[in-house]
Image (tube, rainbow, N blue to C red):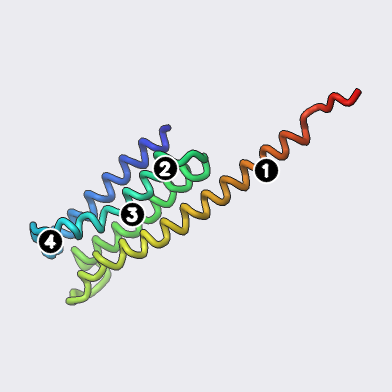
Amino acid sequence: MMVARLSIIFAIFFSTLATAMLMKSGRLSISPDGLTLIGWITAPYVLLALAARFGRLPTVTTGSFVLLILMGTDASLSYADVAFHLWSEPDAEAAMAFISIPTVQIFFSLIGIGLLVGIGEWLARRREKGAGESAPSSDR
């Protein structure tokens, strides 16, 4: 349960940070398009936090949390570069990061969650099979 709470806290943190970087870059307008962009930027974090919160397998909850931390850190550094030009030169295409990064994050989140579910199911079957073999037999 602790991982689920931490996932929600980190999802809120990374969503707020991404929105702040979007506002700092000067590319956010308070309009339906701007709100849609905020929703798009926060979608990967919400997806991973929901997987960590409602995942029924420990592999999914823990793995989603790790994915959330890794993807959030990477995206935050990229958004900071777009907003403050830490490693790159200012250009007109920098704003595309706010559309392309969430797209890549959602794609890899869905693949990651699918793999985590598969691994979790495999481990659960293996555990059940191992428990069935180690049970004492009553053939005497």
Residue 84, given in percent of the width and then of the height, sits at 19, 64
How far apart, in angstroms, are the residues tagged by discs 4 and 3? 19 Å
Looking at numbered disc 4 in the image, what kind of residue is underneath it?
Leu
> What element does badge 2 sit on?
helix
Q: Which residue is mark 1?
A: 126
Q: Amino acid at mark 3?
A: Pro
Structural crowding at the residue carrying mark 2, measured as other residues with C-alpha within 10 Å and reported as few (<14), some (14–19) or many (≥20): many
Q: Which residue is mark 2?
A: 52
**In the image, which disc is placed on residue 44?**
3
Task: Identify the amino acid type marked 1.
Answer: Arg
Q: Residue at x 77, y 33 (%)?
A: 134
Q: What number is the disc on residue 28?
A: 4
Residue under the image location 29 percent in, 57 percent down: 76
Secondary structure, mark 1, is helix
Q: Position of residue 48 (x, y in %)?
A: 38, 49
Q: Disc 3 on helix, strand or loop? A: helix
N-terminal-most mark, 2 or 1? 2
Task: Indicate which disc, 4 or 2, sits on the residue closer to the N terminus.
Answer: 4
Q: CA distance from mark 2 to mark 3?
A: 12 Å
